[in-house]
Amino acid sequence: MSSLFSALTEGPTDRPALRFGDRSLTYGQLAAAAGVTAGRIQGAGRVAVWATPALETAVAVVAALEAGVAVVPLNPKSGEKELGHILADSAPSAVLTAPGSELPSPLGDLPRIDVQATQATGTPAPTPAPSVSPEDAALVVYTSGTTGPPKGAVLPRRALATTLDALADAWQWTGDDVLVHGLPLFHVHGLVLGILGPLRRGGSVRHLGRFTTDGVTRELNDGATMLFGVPTMYHRIAQTLPDDPELAKALARARLLVSGSAALPVHDHERIAAATGRRVIERYGMTETLMNTSVRADGEPRAGTVGVPLPGVELRLVEEDGAPITSYDGETVGEIQVRGPNLFTEYLNRPDATAAAFTADGWFRTGDMAVRDPDGYVRIVGRKATDLIKSGGYKIGAGEIENALLEHHGVREAAVTGEPDADLGERIVAWIVPADPQSPPAIEELADHVARRLAPHKRPRVVHHLDALPRNDMGKIMKRALPRG
């Protein structure tokens, strides 16, 4: 494996590659700009990239990958303690950043390389290091660290190539596609799928800088064919659609609307479909595995599911004792385990954590709980650590209760957890943001609502009202941050 991006050296050099606001680069210009930076870091072991949503971030990552150098993307919103840990753990030889960026003190002693994302041409494209191989590290992406300091997942070049090519198959993604998104660039969704994905296909990407529904309308009306977003973004779209016919028309023109990083509530699926005639499709992945499943572009867009395993990915559900579930009925909850070339190689400097993450025969323990339909569609019901509730002898996924609650007209946001109960083992607790804070729905009303849609044993026994749910940068609810007591 040499270049991950053949379009840098093959095909028309004037083809649009990247656009951030009013700044853009063609493939020829990107090759030239990346070539300059690649020449400055050739032979480095790892480099950090100050991953702001800017043209320079994309150029820096492409330059490093073309030079055979591993990239450590840094979240610009990280606190100093977290940054210090990541830098000490990954030991990059330099930090790549846009000229003029103010870097926090933990980066003060690290050599700085300003990335020039100019439109100059004529500089030859970088030549990949001759020793580069599919198993060489491409990215070291740090996990969220909910149970301790963030761990650096080492993603090899073969994982990037495998996952992006599998998505091209599932989504019929080609060089003619133009992707629009406003995702951060320090994680898999925004960086790998949202920037490297279009470049591997020879297509183009337009980054909004900051997500707005007006930006989505503008870009889809100007020829963009695909939209990537997280549930928070699609929720804002769903809320805006009734009063914005231009947004509805723009979304109807899109070839593909994709949501990821967390589950998109079914009621948002339905609101968007009703207004636009287009279905949002979901996919499922994580830092350590990149992408595992997706609803296919030529498949059934079944709301509430993440589709079927991608080409090359093996997926199974297992019981608590590790025994594989052999018959899928759409009801039995098990932990997802995956195996395939899309997986990471290790947690950097953590052989103990790496060993614990895999079974003896090479299956990665995702910690995600799901059910699987007889035809292979997978439906995520929550995280094993926070979303699996054992109540009255049943194993219940919090996700399906959250979806049911969100279908109630009086609920704007919902989270579900379990808490100890002497009789049931755990009782189901709902945390809701009422649509009308002055008149929140009563617990009896919500319990009956859930019981009618799902089953009586899945009804919440306790309901807490909040002004807002705690969420991270990707819009995921942080259940560990919910108030206790």
Image (cartoon, rainbow, N blue to C red):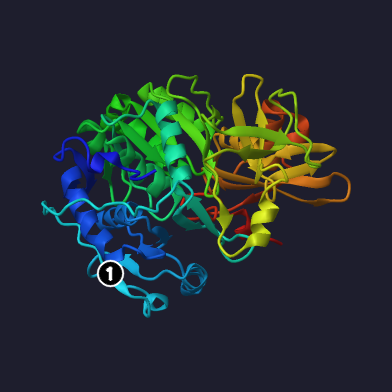
What is the quadrant of residue 176 in the picture? top left
Name the image quarter holding the C terminus.
Answer: bottom right
Q: Is residue 264 visible?
A: no
The image shows residue 379, relative to residue 37, as above or below, that is: above
Horizontal and vertical percent position of residue 291: 50, 39
Foreground pick, 438 / 463: 463
Horizontal and vertical percent position of residue 277: 38, 21
Foreground pick, 139 / 437: 139
Horizontal and vertical percent position of residue 28: 16, 45
Q: Residue furthest front?
A: 130
Could you say whether the residue bearing mark 1 is in a helix, strand or loop? strand
Please tell me how crowded label 1 is: few (under 14), some (14-19), or many (20+) other residues with Cα within 10 Å. Answer: some
Horizontal and vertical percent position of residue 35: 22, 55
- At a point 42% along the width and 34% down the height, the residue shown is 165
- At a point 73% along the width and 46% down the height, the residue shown is 360
**13 with respect to 49 (left or right):** left
- At a point 70% along the width and 34% down the height, the residue shown is 317
Q: Which residue is mark 1?
A: 113
The image shows residue 356, relative to residue 322, as above or below, that is: below
**273 with respect to 484 (left or right):** left
What is the quadrant of residue 174 in the picture? top left
Q: Mark 1: which amino acid?
A: Ile
Name the image quarter holding the N terminus.
Answer: top left
**453 with respect to 312 (left or right):** right
Q: Is residue 250 visible?
A: yes
